[in-house]
Image: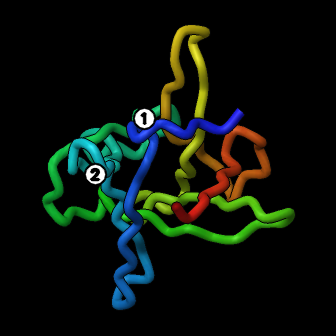
Amino acid sequence: MAMEMASSRWRLQFDPASGAYECTHLNSGLVLDLEGGRGEPGTNIITYPAHGGQNQRWKIEQLDQGSLSVQSVQRPNLYMTAITDNSHYIINVIGGERTTSPRARWHFRKV
């Protein structure tokens, strides 16, 4: 079931010079940030005040069947994924070349 809450809404701002996006949470004004700029699989993606760093930039690529992959600009071998601990979802990154894992396929909808 898709989440329709305001807490799940984001603004994606494209920078044509870098070909990357900054993803801003509409309620908090914070952006998606590869925590600490670390480069290993399992690193969490957090929300953090925007500072323009490469760890806050994301490349979005169209995959098959309308899904998208979200790749770290700072660490191009890392892709955004979602896991659960049975009480809430955790967004982090997995390594690999344009993974086909269902957990790393995203769908965005304009609202």
Q: Which residue is the extreme one toward the right?
A: 65
Report if the CB atoms under discs 2 and 1 are less than 8 Å apart.
no
* Relative side of 37 to 64, left or right: left
Q: Which residue is the extreme one toward the bottom?
A: 17
* Relative side of 35 to 86, left or right: left
The answer to which image quadrant residue 19 occupies is bottom left
The way the protein has been coloured in the rendering is rainbow
Residue 72 on image: x %, y %: 45, 58
Quadrant in which the N terminus appears: top right
The residue at the point 52 percent across, 61 percent down is 111
Q: Where 6 falls versus 78 (above or below)?
A: above
Residue 60 on image: x %, y %: 56, 68
Q: Secondary structure at mark 2?
A: strand
Q: Which residue is mark 1?
A: 43
How dense is the environment of label 1, judged by Cα within 10 Å: few (below 14), some, or many (20 and up)? some
* Relative side of 80 to 63, left or right: left
The residue at the point 21 percent across, 50 percent down is 29
Residue 104 on image: x %, y %: 67, 46
Q: Residue type at mark 1?
A: Thr
The disc at residue 31 is 2
How dense is the environment of label 2, judged by Cα within 10 Å: few (below 14), some, or many (20 and up)? many
Q: Where 1 falls versus 10 (above or below)?
A: above
Label located before the other in sequence (2 or 1): 2
